């Protein structure tokens, strides 16, 4: 096992695609992922797990049921509880750190063209 720091800016510089999370670390049964987002994602939910969003750069809006939205700026974090429908979106390219259990599919049960294949940097 390698015990080395991960420089998030260096990892973010390695990719340009949007809505395709990249694993940069592991903690117990969880993965630490980086993702760049731009535009609107799909409405989805994760029935078995919470999902943590930490904005590094930019601004992320998380749409929630009943017309509610939460806007996150740099160094702000939000945990969406398991089973809650949500839709992330960003008007400008935004870099986000995600913390979620290994094997979680980014589109939850919604599936579709934005479903990402697992990738490790």
Image (cartoon, rainbow, N blue to C red):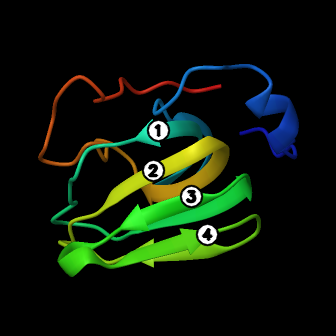
Q: Which residue is mark 3?
A: 60
Mark before the other along the chain sequence, 2 or 1:
1
Q: Which residue is mark 4?
A: 72
Quadrant of image for the C terminus: top right
- For the residues labelled 4 and 3, the Cα–Cα distance comes to 5 Å
Q: Nearer the viewer, residue 78 or 2?
A: 78
Is residue 83 positioned above or below 38 on the image?
Answer: below
Task: Please tell me how crowded label 4 is: few (under 14), some (14-19), or many (20+) other residues with Cα within 10 Å.
Answer: many
Task: Please tell me how crowded label 3 is: few (under 14), some (14-19), or many (20+) other residues with Cα within 10 Å.
Answer: many
Is residue 46 positioned above or below 38 on the image?
Answer: below
Is residue 34 visible from the viewing direction of this image? Answer: no
Mark before the other along the chain sequence, 3 or 2:
3
Q: Residue at x 86, y 31 (%)?
A: 10
Mark before the other along the chain sequence, 1 or 4:
1
Pointer 2 and pointer 1: residues touching (CB < 8 Å)?
A: yes
Pointer 1 and pointer 4: residues touching (CB < 8 Å)?
A: no
Q: Which residue is mark 2?
A: 89
Q: Residue at x 34, y 71 (%)?
A: 50
For this view, does 81 lie left or right of residue 2?
Answer: left
Q: Which residue is mark 1?
A: 39
């Amino acid at each position: 096992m390698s015990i080395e720091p991960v420089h998030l800016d260096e990892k973010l510089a390695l990719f340009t695609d949007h809505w395709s999370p990249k694993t940069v670390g592991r903690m117990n049964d969880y993965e630490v992922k980086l993702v760049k987002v731009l535009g609107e994602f799909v409405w989805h939910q994760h029935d078995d797990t919470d999902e943590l969003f930490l904005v590094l750069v930019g601004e992320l809006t998380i749409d929630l049921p009943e017309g509610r939205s939460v806007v996150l700026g740099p160094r702000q974090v939000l945990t969406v509880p398991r089973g809650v429908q949500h839709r992330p979106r960003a008007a400008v390219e935004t870099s986000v750190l995600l913390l979620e259990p290994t094997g979680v599919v980014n589109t939850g049960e919604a599936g579709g063209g934005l479903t990402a294949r697992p990738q490790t940097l």
